[in-house]
Image: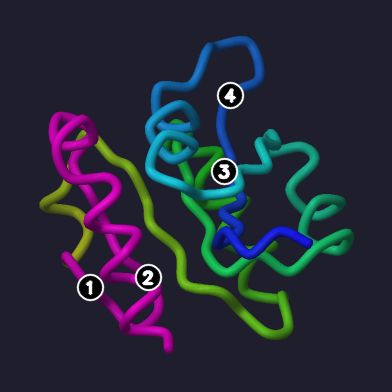
Amino acid sequence: MNLDPHVLLVTVAAQPSRAAMLLTQGGYLVTKTTAEHASDATSACVPEAVVVDLPAFDEVNVMRVLDHMKPRPPVLVLTNLPRLYPKKRGDRYALCRAEVESDLICAVDRMLADAA
């Protein structure tokens, strides 16, 4: 039985994911999926949190899928344009990609604490 918090990471399949490595090192159980398979991954498991690391167009489609999840976990969007996203909006959060190295684990910890 694994007690580590489960994070679903939605990212580009062809690229290695720095976010996945940081989350794993931070003590999270990470399931990595792509935008095309996000609906399959969300039906197979209910993660405690979702981190979306995609281009803006793909992100919009994934957010539509996540809006239909029951229960809906909190979502952290990694973005190059943080001004387009409020830092916290309901159960959705944003983090600038330039801050991923220093703030990703803290952002996910905060997000999970707010959801509890």
Closer to the observer: label 4 or label 3? 3
Question: Mark 1 and mark 4: span between their CA atoms?
Answer: 24 Å
Residues drawn in magenta: 87-116
Tag 4: amino acid: Val
Instruction: Say which quarter of the image contains residue 18.
Output: top left
The answer to which of marks 2 and 4 sits earlier in the sequence is: 4
Question: Mark 3 and mark 2: span between their CA atoms?
Answer: 14 Å
Tag 2: amino acid: Arg
* Above or below, comparing residue 60 to residue 68 in the picture: above
The residue under label 3 is 9
Category of crowding for the residue at label 1, using alpha-carbon neighbours closer than 10 angstroms: few (below 14), some (14–19), many (at least 20): few
Category of crowding for the residue at label 2, using alpha-carbon neighbours closer than 10 angstroms: few (below 14), some (14–19), many (at least 20): some
Image location (x, y in percent) of residue 98: 14, 29
Tell me if residue 109 is in the magenta stretch.
yes
Q: Residue at x 58, y 24 (%)?
A: 12
Q: Secondary structure at mark 1?
A: strand
Question: Mark 4 and mark 3: span between their CA atoms?
Answer: 10 Å
Q: Secondary structure at mark 2?
A: strand
The answer to which of marks 1 and 4 sits earlier in the sequence is: 4
The answer to which of marks 3 and 2 sits earlier in the sequence is: 3
Is the residue under label 2 in contact with that under label 3 (CB below 8 Å)?
A: no
Question: Mark 2 and mark 4: span between their CA atoms?
Answer: 20 Å
Closer to the observer: label 3 or label 1? 3
Tell me if residue 49 is in the magenta stretch.
no
Q: How would you classify the magenta stretch by its main secondary structure?
A: helix
The residue under label 4 is 12
The quarter of the picture where the C terminus appears is: bottom left
The residue under label 2 is 92
